[in-house]
Image (cartoon, rainbow, N blue to C red):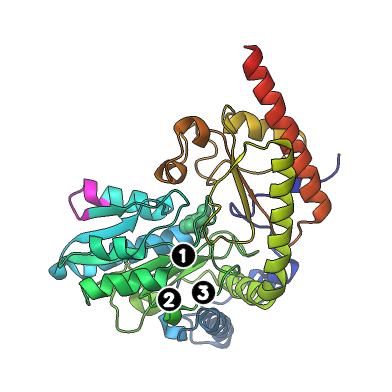
Amino acid sequence: MSAPVYLDHAATTPVAAEVRAAMLPFLGEVFGNPSSAHATGRAAREAVDEARARVASALGCAPAEVVFTSGGTEADNLALRGALDRHASRGRHLVVTAIEHDAVLKTAEELAGWGRCEVTVVPCDRHGVVDPEAVGDAVRADTVLVSVMLANNEVGTVQDVAAAAEAARRRNPAVLVHTDAVQALGRLPVDVRALGVDMASITAHKVYGPKGAGALYVRRGVPVAAQVSGGGQERARRSGTENVAAIAGLAAAVGLVEAEREREMPRLARLSERLVEGVLEGVPDAVLTGRGAPRLPSFATFAFAGVETEMLLTLLDRQGIEASGGSACSSGAHMPSHVLLAMGLPPGVAGGALRCTLGRATTADEVDLAAREIVAAVTRLRSAASVV
Ligand SMILES: Cc1ncc(COP(=O)(O)O)c(C=O)c1O
């Protein structure tokens, strides 16, 4: 059987050959601890410093403003927990949006459940767009942090984070602004100064890097309380001996997608459009979730009334088409996605969600095949349902 058509790049991406090559020395001869003063340690330190400079240059910040983490989830946790812990004297109110990744939403909910903060959840409209002014309106005198994701992981909608940051600071100039830029990186410019954020989360595995490597940008002069303490690495913001290979992989991956972004994104936009057209031709009533909003070019997302996501994914998988329902975390569960429900989709439609996310290796032939198989699977499931 031929290789599967992989249309789940928002879940994770294959490690690029150049990224693997950049990592290998640190799984071999360059094995030092970056904290050791000898030559072996210094070689590892140099690699970490170089990686920090590359990531900083992609984000438009200073190297000292980059804190390496184990990925996007840890970066989001450090932003929320670290800000609340460190700025308790200012208040304990958090503002998040209804379409955040669980790394933000569940963390906020958990902290609220423990009585450590109060949370205001700002809704989105039916296109999956959050009104920046509504973010500002939710800010109070005791608001410590506002978290608005740059691009959504389920429907790919892009938020005007700069406007939200501006609206938030108009209400409370001391408020900190965080953005989860995990999905946006490599697909949109992620310039932290232009976005006007104090913190931004990224991860390597969505951009052809290894899993378990990410970073949090923390603006100079913004203290955050470390959530992992110990030897004081990462300027005491995240202790633990650095995962040098993963950090080198993150930097190589960031460099790769940034170098290719301007050429690659128009290509992916054309391919996702082709996929949408192919699906619509066969299933004219397919709901194009997130359409009508600025979106990542790599996303083609649908919802099919009368179809269950899990059955659809199973049929597609059997035909060698790999996609997902919503986020990778919830695709195994039966729950309709919180993002689609926040967009006002009825549960009967949201329960038939399909997320196709394209990447570097995606071709027109693959997209055409995927469109045919999606149409066939939806038609089959609907006719089976009508027989019952
Ligand atoms: C928007 C968003 N934030 C955070 C994460 C979590 O990142 P990681 O898998 O590196 O922990 C993901 C991954 O699915 C994501 O899509």
Tell me how many marks there are.
3
Contact? badges 3 and 2 (CB < 8 Å): yes
**Residue that appears at 41% across and 67% down:** 179
Q: Position of residue 197 (x, y in %)?
A: 38, 75
**Residue that appears at 52% across and 76% down:** 33
Q: Position of residue 59 (x, y in %)?
A: 51, 79
Q: Is residue 202 above or below residue 130?
A: below
- Mark linked to residue 150: 1
Q: Is residue 215 visible?
A: yes
Q: Position of residue 178 (x, y in %)?
A: 36, 68
Contact? badges 1 and 3 (CB < 8 Å): yes
- Horizontal side, residue 288 vs residue 384: left or right: left
Q: In the displayed orientation, state which residue is furthest to the top.
A: 388
**Which residue bears the numbered disc 2?**
195
**Residue that appears at 73% across and 60% down:** 270
- Mark 1–mark 3 distance (CA, rounded to whole Å): 9 Å
Q: Is residue 383 above or below residue 372?
A: above
- Report which quarter residue 164 is drawn in: bottom left
The amino acid type of the residue labelled 3 equals Val
Going from the N terminus, do you reach mark 3 or mark 2 first? 3
**Which residue bears the numbered disc 3?**
190
Q: Quick check: is the Cβ at mark 3 less than 8 Å away from ligand 1?
A: no
Q: Is residue 230 visible?
A: no
Residue count near mark 3 (Cα–Cα under 10 Å), binned few <14, some 14–19, many ≥20: many
Contact? badges 1 and 2 (CB < 8 Å): yes
**Residue that appears at 64% across and 54% down:** 9
Q: Is residue 44 above or below residue 353?
A: below
Going from the N terminus, do you reach mark 1 or mark 2 first? 1
Q: Quadrant of the N terminus?
A: top right
- Mark 3–mark 2 distance (CA, rounded to whole Å): 8 Å
Range covered by the magenta-colored residues? 111-118
The amino acid type of the residue labelled 1 equals Leu
